[in-house]
Image (cartoon, rainbow, N blue to C red):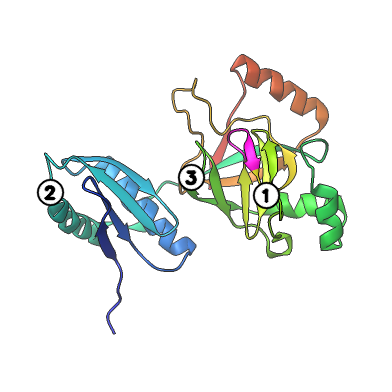
Amino acid sequence: MPSAYPRLAANGDRAVVIELSDQISEDTNRRVVALAENLDRQPIAGVIETVPTYRSLLVSYDPLIVRGRDLQVLLLERLSTVRVEEARARRLVVPVLYGGDAGLDLNEMAEMKRMGTADLIALHGAADYRVYMIGFAPGFAYLGGLPEALHTPRLAVPRQRIEAGAIGIGGKQASINSVAGPSGWRFIGRTPIRMFDPTRSDAFLLKAGDHVRFRAIEEDEAAALDAAVAAGTAPIDWEDA
């Protein structure tokens, strides 16, 4: 039986969605990101923007330059030529001060998992996380790769305000709060580094397809990084993924 994917659909009169699967997987997401990056490097006339998600790509376009039906044909042709290996591979090393006021749920989670807080921190920091998509809030990255032992349901009642930089766990996913706001995720620490900063030339630090590794830090390093962020001189630590 032939596969139903890729599948294309109009999204209003100025966008097309190309779905690559009905399942969430790293392989599917890598294909989504590879297609988005290919379109960025070799634009199709009329395409304005692409937005990668877990398993699909939203492509917005100018209907005065390209018709939606024609764009769908062009997208299928382009997808057939894209190689996953073309996608970039970079990893952001995120310094994290675990526990304290920002790590509201660290001790409770350790008790739930029947492990010490040091073991939980080590397990959280040993994983390689993948940014599957950016959404919900500006610069908010949904991270896959959370160790199964740390999978934890979200809170039954969300908190009214969690600050930017909070390190969260929700179900099978991990996160880094990009802006302050309400959240039902569980939080185990904070990073001074800002995922969203409108004063930077590129306001969004992470993009779909990036990788993340968490590095535990102490109070003195966190304080120094807080000061550097305020001064606009904080180092951003990238490494090859």
Which contiguous range is marked in magenta? 177-182
The residue identified by callout 1 is 185
Image position, residue 134 (x, y; %):
48, 44
Label 1: few (<14), some (14–19) or many (≥20) C-alpha neighbours in 10 Å: many
Q: Which mark is residue 135?
A: 3
Label 2: few (<14), some (14–19) or many (≥20) C-alpha neighbours in 10 Å: some
Q: Is residue 119 visible?
A: no
Disc 3 secondary structure class: loop
Image position, residue 64 (x, y; %):
11, 39
Query: What residue appears at the point 68 percent right and 64 percent down from the top-left corner?
Result: 148
Q: Which mark is residue 67?
A: 2
Query: What residue appears at the point 14 percent right and 56 percent down from the top-left corner?
Result: 69
Name the amino acid type tagged 1: Trp
Marked residue nearer the N-terminal end (2 or 3): 2
Image position, residue 221 (x, y; %):
77, 27
What is the CA distance from the residue labelled 1 to the residue labelled 3?
A: 15 Å
User: Foreground residue, 133 or 67?
Assistant: 67
Label 3: few (<14), some (14–19) or many (≥20) C-alpha neighbours in 10 Å: few
Query: What residue appears at the point 21 percent right and 47 percent down from the top-left corner?
Result: 13
Q: Is residue 173 left or right of residue 30?
A: right
Disc 2 secondary structure class: loop
Marked residue nearer the N-terminal end (1 or 3): 3
Query: What residue appears at the point 48 percent right and 61 percent down from the top-left corner?
Result: 26
Q: Is residue 137 left or right of residue 101?
A: left
Q: Is residue 6 visible?
A: yes
Q: Determine whether 116 is above or below 22 in the image.
A: above
> Residue 97 is drawn in which quadrant?
top right
Image position, residue 36 (x, y; %):
33, 48
What is the CA distance from the residue labelled 2 to the residue labelled 1?
A: 42 Å
Name the amino acid type tagged 2: Arg
